[in-house]
Image: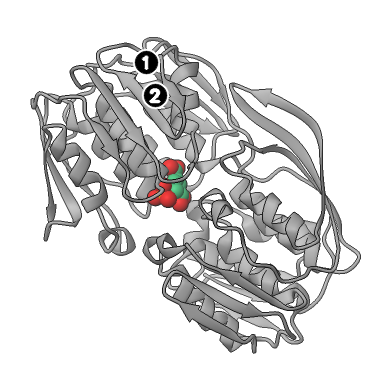
Amino acid sequence: MEFNVMPGGTICGEVRVPGDKSISHRSIMLGALAQGQTRITGFLEGEDALATVAAFRAMGVQIDGPSGGEVTVHGVGMRGLVAPPNALDLGNSGTSVRLLAGLLAGQDFDVELTGDESLRARPMGRVIEPLTRMGADIRGAGGDHLPLFIRGSQDLQGIHYDLPMASAQVKSCALLAGLYACGRTSVTEPAPTRDHTERMLRGFGYEVSSGNGKVGINGGGSLTATDIDVPADISSAAFFLVAASIAPGSDLILTHVGINPTRTGVLNILNLMGADISQHNVGEVGGEPVADIHVRYAPLKGIDIPLDQVPLAIDELPVLFIAAACAQGRTVLRGARELRVKESDRIAAMAEGLTTLGIDNEVLEDGIIIEGGILRGGLIHTFHDHRIAMAFAIAALRAKEEIQILDCDHVATSFPDFDAMARGVGLQISARTD
Ligand code: S3P
C-alpha cells in the first residue's frame, strides 16, 4: 500500500483513535494467566496486538473476539498454558516477543519465538541477558536475534537487574519472568519508562512495589481476572496532535486518550514548542489516567528536547521531527539512541525523508538536529516502519507539493484505517494498494 497526500488542509473535528497498543498486549497476556474471564473493551485491532492474541490461542487460551474492540479472555491460570504446536510468529511486534520471552521462560514446555524480517533484525540480547541470569535456558540465532529458543522446566531465581537502557519491554520481560521465579525479582531503570505492566499487575491483584526508579515483585502469586477499558493510544493521537498544531486554522478534539505520565512526553515537548493543547474530562480507567485533548493550531518554535522527555516520547519522536521541521528555528534531539533499533533505524529513516522534503538536518549518533523550514513534496521511503509512514503523511499539511509515501502496509500494525480517520478530519490522503 502507498499513501498519496495532497498539500495543505486544516484538521478539525472530534475523533477517538484506536486503543493503546502497549495496554492491549498486556491485557491479553495477564488475562490469559489469570483465573476467570477478563473482558476487554477498546482493544486495538491492529496486527501487533492480534499477533499476541494468536500466540495465546496457540497455547490453548480461548479468546473471544476482537469484535468492535471487545475481547473476552478465558484465563487458564498461571500454570495453564500448553505447548504451542509450532513456533510462535509475532510478526512485526517487538513488544509481543520481548514480553513473551519473559513469560515463557518459566513454563514447563519448550517454545520457539520468531517474527518478520524487521523483527528478526532487532536486538534480543537485551532480554536474553536478564533471563539467563534468572536461570532460563534461552538462545537466540547468532546470539542476539530471533528465532529465540526457550527450553521449559527451568527453575527461575529472582534477581535484581539494573537495566542498561531505558526499556519498558526489558523491564516487563524481567517482571513477567519474575512471576514464575523463586523469591524476589526487581529492576532499576536508568530513566522512567512506561509502567503499564506494573499498573495492570496491580489491577489483576498482584502486589508490585515501586519507587525511586525500582520495581519489584515476589514470584509465586496468582492473578485474578478483571475488566479492562483500554484508553485511546497517545502514540496514535500524536499524529493528530502534530497535525492540528502545524496546520493553520485547525481545531481538534481527541477523546479518551491515555495520559499516563510515563507516556506524555509528546504533550510536554509540543507545549515547550508553543503548541496550544489542553486537557478536559480528566479521569481514570482501570488504573490508567485518560483525558480528552483539545489541540488548536499555533506557531511552533524549535527547542532543545529535554533529555528526560526522550523515553517518555520514544514512539512519538518521528512525528515530533515533523513538528520540528515546521517550527521556527532549530530543534535538537540527543539521548535517543534507542530510536536506531525500533521497527527501522528511525533517525536515519526520518533524516532521509526530511532531506527529500528540503529540510536541513544533521544526524547525530544518538539524535538529530533539525532546522525548521519550507517543506517541498517528494517520494518517501518508510523502511516498512508504520510510524515513519504516518509521520510523513502529516507533513503534507505544510508541504508545497504532494507527498507520495511507499510501503505503508505496516501502518496496520498499530493504526488500522489511519488513512480513513485522517481523511475524516481533513488530511487530503488517499491510499492505493497495488
Ligand atoms: C513498549 C515499549 C517501548 C516502545 C514500544 C512499546 C511496550 O519499547 O517503543 O512501542 O509496550 O513496553 P522499549 O521499551 O524497548 O523502548
**SS at badge 2:** helix
Residue 167: x percent and y percent?
A: 39, 47
Q: Which residue is mark 1?
A: 34
**SS at badge 1:** loop
- For residue 30, which quarter of the picture? top left
Which of the two residues, 60 or 327, is positioned nearer the viewer here? 327
Q: What's the residue type where badge 2 is placed? A: Leu
Q: Is residue 310 above or below residue 45?
A: below
- Residues at circles 2 and 1 in contact by the CB criterion of under 8 Å: yes
How far is disc 2 from disc 1 in space, using C-alphas?
6 Å
Q: Which residue is mark 2?
A: 30
Residue at 73% x, 84% y is 373
Q: What's the residue type where badge 1 is placed? A: Ala
Q: Residue furthest right?
A: 249
Cβ of disc 1 within 8 Å of ligand 1? no
Q: Which numbered disc covers residue 155?
A: none
